[in-house]
Image (cartoon, grey):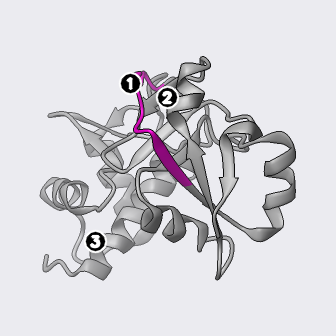
Amino acid sequence: MEWTAEKVKFVSKKMSVALRHKPDRYGITLDEEGWTDLHDFIRALNRVHHFSPRLSEKDIRYVSQHTNKRRFELTDRKIRARYGHSVPVILKKERKAPPEILYHGTSHQALKSIMEKGLLPMKRQYVHLSSDQETALQVGRRHDAHPALLQINAAEAEKDGIEFFIGNDEVWLCRELPPEYIMVIS
């Protein structure tokens, strides 16, 4: 199969839906840590989306390696999403001291609630934070064409007992973040 950036993104989104949000729609079962059999997963993607040519293990590995956010983890026989689940799985995350400042992009509509209650995981297991402004704005654009950009005083939050976990090079996770660590910067 010939891969373009658009094709990688399209397949990656389908993989994310199956592994993070709707495994039952695909007829796959995730274990308690979010893993599923790689070959069952490939068969399910091909069955649901009628890919032509059909996706192979080589294709799935290619997409996994070429997504910009390292969303997937593979072994010889299994696959899982690294983060962002809305279905219950227990992801064992590495706790680590975050950078001093992190960012979060959001809709202007959500700002009042965030500044009153803080950042909450909503339908996910963790709050997702970005290590750079552009990634945060890109995420925020999913909900608002001109998103609000929040600056997170992560070092202070961690010092005060908030646990941070590594999602990947650009994504940091925490269970929730009180408003005193959040500042609107645009």
Image quadrant where one finds the N terminus: bottom left
In the current view of this chain or complex, which residue is farthest to the top?
161
Q: What residue type is labelled 2?
A: Phe
Where is residue 165 shown, x and y percent of the image? 44, 29
**Within-10-Å neighbours for mark 2: few <14, some 14–19, many 20+:** many
Q: Which amino acid does label 3 sit on?
A: Val
Q: What stretch is highlighted in magenta?
A: 91-103
Where is residue 125 shown, x and y percent of the image? 61, 34
The one of 4 and 147 positioned closer to us in this rendering: 147
Mark 3–mark 2 distance (CA, rounded to whole Å): 29 Å
Taking 139 as reference, is 22 above or below it? above
Do the residues bearing badges 3 and 1 touch, measured as CB atoms within 8 Å? no
Q: Earlier in the sequence, mark 2 or mark 1?
A: 1
Do the residues bearing badges 2 and 1 touch, measured as CB atoms within 8 Å? yes
**Mark number, residue 164:** 2
* Residue 23 makes an appearance in the image: no
* Residue 55 makes an appearance in the image: yes
Image position of 148 (left or right of 45)? right
Q: Earlier in the sequence, mark 3 or mark 2?
A: 3
- Residue 181 placement: quadrant: top right
Mark 2–mark 1 distance (CA, rounded to whole Å): 6 Å
The residue at which mark 1 appears reads as: 96
The residue at which mark 3 appears reads as: 8
The one of 39 and 89 positioned closer to us in this rendering: 89
Confirm whether the magenta stretch covers residue 136: no
